[in-house]
Image (spheres, grey):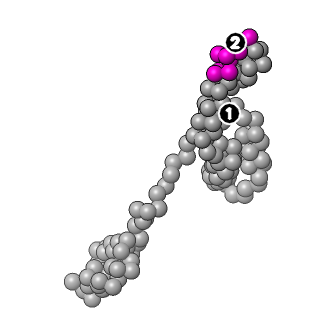
Amino acid sequence: MSKIDRVLLTNEKWLEIWNNSIADFKPTGVSDHSPCIVSWAERSKEQIHSFKFYNFWTNDDSLYKVIEDRWKQPVERNPMFVFTRKFKLLKKDIKLWAKSKFSNLEKRINDARIQLEAIQRQLQAQPRNTSLAQEEHSLT
């Protein structure tokens, strides 16, 4: 094992600081030196979250405005780069839009359920109340 091998593979201080580093030693070829490529593996804490698109979002007209605004933004380079870049930027825009429109969705669903149940209890006491019936229908 050469000095550099020992430095990268057995140096405890190096491993403590750069614990996600990887040393890839290449064949020496015609040289008496062995090339080494040091790279860093992605940290497990940094998870890539997949993008989820919900079909019900298409019922909201403001989504189309977000898409249109992003697609109109100029991006320069070759067509494939432009296409992929716009999609990456659009993904960020849609995530922000969805967060602003549908944040606390579970709480909002629960609140709507409580409101619906309250109206239905009132309807049981007043079955001929048409305004309560319309309000119930608008919530279902």
Amino acid at pointer 2: Pro
> In the rendering, at what x and y percent does residue 119 appear?
68, 24
Q: Nearer the viewer, residue 69 or 106?
A: 106
> In front: 65, or 70?
65
Q: What residue is rendered at 51% in x and 48% in y?
A: 50
Q: Residue at x 35, y 83 (%)?
A: 14
* Label 2 to label 1: alpha-carbon separation: 36 Å
Toward the top, the furthest residue is 128
For residue 140, above or below residue 15: above
Q: State which tag comes first along the sequence, 2 or 1.
A: 1
Residue 133, percent across and down?
72, 17
Magenta region: 120-128
SS at circle 1: helix
- Residue drawn at x 63%, y 36% is 111
Determine which residue is flagged by label 2.
Answer: 127
Q: Using the image, tell me which numbered label, if any, was put on residue 58.
A: 1
The image quadrant where one finds the N terminus is bottom left
Does residue 115 sit above or below 125 in this rendering? Answer: below
**Can you tell which quarter of the image residue 131 is in?**
top right
Q: Is residue 132 above or below residue 27?
A: above
Residue 9 numbered mark, or none: none
Secondary-structure class at tag 2: loop
Q: Quadrant of the C terminus?
A: top right
Placement of 96 over or under 39, stated as above or below: above
Q: Is residue 23 magenta?
A: no
Task: Quadrant for residue 62, please give it.
Answer: top right
Q: Hey, what amino acid is under mark 1?
A: Thr
Majority secondary structure in the magenta region:
helix
